[in-house]
Amino acid sequence: MPRDLSDIEFRDHPSGLDWAAMKADLTADDFDNGRTPEQLARSFEVSYAVVYALDGPRCVAMARILADGVCNAYLLDVWTLSSHRRRGIASEMVRRLLERVPGHHVALSTEHASKLYTSLGFEEERQLGMSTVVGKWLESEA
C-alpha cells in the first residue's frame, strides 16, 4: 500500500543542502563512516545518480548509485533519519535510483535492511563478497 509522502520533496541535486547538518544526523543515527562533510558531498557529487529527500529545508534521507552506464551498478549510502523511517522514503529513493539504471545488475551490501531490499526485488546472493582499502581509509590524493 503506497504511503503518503506528499510532505517529502525528492530531488536529484544537492542545491541548498547543509552537509555539516547531514553529517551530524548520520553520526546521531550511527550511520557515519568517518567522512567529513566535504568528503560526504564529494561522494554524492561523483555518483552516477543520487536522490535526496527533504522535509521542509532539512534533508531527512539520501541514497546514491554508482554505475558504468552499461550493465553494472552498486547501490549505497541509503539512509533515512530515524524520525522519518518506516514511511516508505527509502523505498521511494531506491525505486527512483533503479529507474536510472535499466538493464544493469545492481548489487548492494546491507547488514540490517534485507527486508527492505527484498521488498524491492533484490535477492540474496550466496557469493562471497570481498573488499580492500587502498592506502589509509579516507585519505587520498584527489
Image (spheres, grey):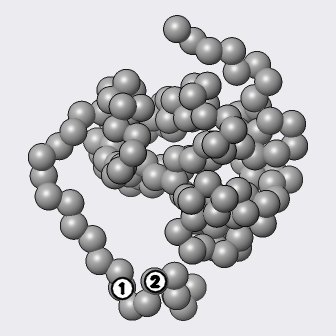
Residue 108 relative to residue 79: left or right: left
Q: Residue at x 76, y 31 (%)?
A: 9
Q: Position of residue 58 (x, y in %)?
A: 82, 45
Q: Residue at x 56, y 59 (%)?
A: 30
Query: What label does residue 134 carry, if any?
Result: 1
Count of all numbered marks drawn on residues in the image: 2
Q: Residue at x 20, y 60 (%)?
A: 129
Q: Nearer the viewer, residue 90 or 111?
A: 111
Q: Nearer the viewer, residue 95 or 117?
A: 117
Q: Is residue 139 above or below residue 21?
A: below
Mark 2 lies on residue: 137
Which one is in front in this view, the residue at disc 1 or the one at disc 2? 2
Q: In whole angstroms, how far apart are the C-alphas of marks 1 and 2?
A: 7 Å
Which residue type carries mark 2? Trp
Q: Position of residue 86 (x, y in %)?
A: 57, 28
Which residue type carries mark 1? Val
Quarter-wise, where is residue 82 in the image?
Answer: top right
Q: Is residue 113 above or below residue 1?
A: below
Q: Position of residue 92 (x, y in %)?
A: 56, 28
Q: Residue at x 86, y 36 (%)?
A: 56
SS at mark 1 in the image: loop
Q: How many neighbours does mark 2 have within 10 angstroms: few (below 14), some (14-19), or many (20 or more)? A: few
Which quadrant of the rendered structure holds the C terminus? bottom right
SS at mark 2 in the image: loop
